[in-house]
Image (cartoon, rainbow, N blue to C red):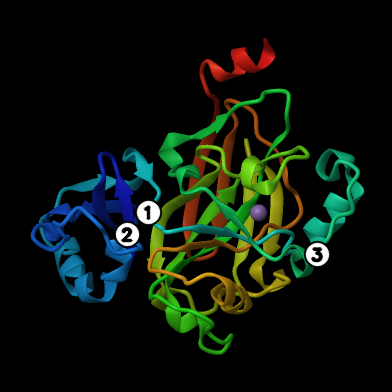
Amino acid sequence: MRLCRFNSDRLGVVVGDEVVDVTATLDGEAPIRPWPIAPGDWLIANIDRLRPVLEAAANGGGERHKLTDVALLAPVANPTKIIGAPVNFYSHHAEASADKALNFGAEVKTIHDYGLFLKANTSLAGPSEGIELIMPERRHDHEGEMVVVIGRRCRSVSEAEALDYVAGYTMGIDMTARGTEDRSLRKSLDTYSMVGPYFVTADEIADPDKLDLKLWVNDELRQDSNTDKLIFSTRKLIAYASDFYTLYPGDIIMTGTPSGVGRVLAGDEVRLEIEGLGTLVTRGRVREGVGARDAA
Ligand code: MN
């Protein structure tokens, strides 16, 4: 099953190239107590229970739209955290080591040394929102990545059981402003965790560690690899992260990017495709007002 969030927080089941609006199925289902809410994404936490209702609604009379006609938002609305995997492909390690515009004179290590990082939840955005570029003198680079969505609360799970805690998958662009500041600044700008186009339940993906990944900017192929080249596999990332952080339903793990990272400018179309997960299309745009202040 494939789920998207679109327009003004509508819930859709994606069927072929169409979206069926199933928002009404949530009436009477969603919690009404506003505070304190349980940590995690309520929809993802309840996905197994809701699935038959959602699937029935998708085959029913819900309003249908072309997927390309709706404004897609991030398919997971309320993660407790967005976890990043720093330098998790050797091909990206090689290019970052060779390019001063990426390494700023510092030795580049891999995930073995860097561990993990967190991205602010306010950086989460969907394709229709575009990538908001500030600091125009900087390089702002795309990092196309496969994304894991956690389904159940867990701590210290083993690699062997890690996938049991996955609700499904999607993909994302871990946008990065190049510079010397900490990752938690440079990768956490608003819209810098671009996720979509929809969420795919885990049963549709036989092996997350064997998926082709391609990213284009304005039809120029920039990144072309496969998740079988991850340094820390999906299973290892989940197990490793769960040793440090309790993982909750809806938590997002961006699994790392291969070589080919490059600049996104205002007006550029960025297109990411990962096998079985669809196509994410978004655009760079200038954040009004901030560029002028930055230049002053
Ligand atoms: Mn990344």
- Examine the image and state in which quarter residue 73 appears: top left
**Under 8 Å from ligand 1: the CB of mark 2?**
no
Q: Is residue 231 above or below residue 188?
A: below
Marks 3 and 2 sit apart, C-alpha to C-alpha, by 33 Å
Tell me where residue 180 appears, x and y as whole percent.
78, 39
Residue position for label 2: 3
Count of numbered labels shown in the rendering: 3
Tell me where residue 131 appears, x and y as whole percent.
53, 35
Question: Which of the pair 118/62 is nearer the observer?
Answer: 118
Q: CB under 8 Å between callouts 3 and 2?
A: no
Circle 2 residues within 10 Å: few <14, some 14–19, many ≥20: many
Question: Which of the pair 23/76 is nearer the observer?
Answer: 76
Residue position for label 3: 90
Q: CB under 8 Å between callouts 2 and 1?
A: yes
Local SS, label 2: strand
Q: Is residue 114 above or below residue 173?
A: below
Tell me where residue 30 appears, x and y as whole percent.
17, 60
Circle 3 residues within 10 Å: few <14, some 14–19, many ≥20: some
- Check disc 3 and give the amino acid type: Tyr
Q: Is residue 266 above or below residue 283?
A: above
Residue position for label 1: 75
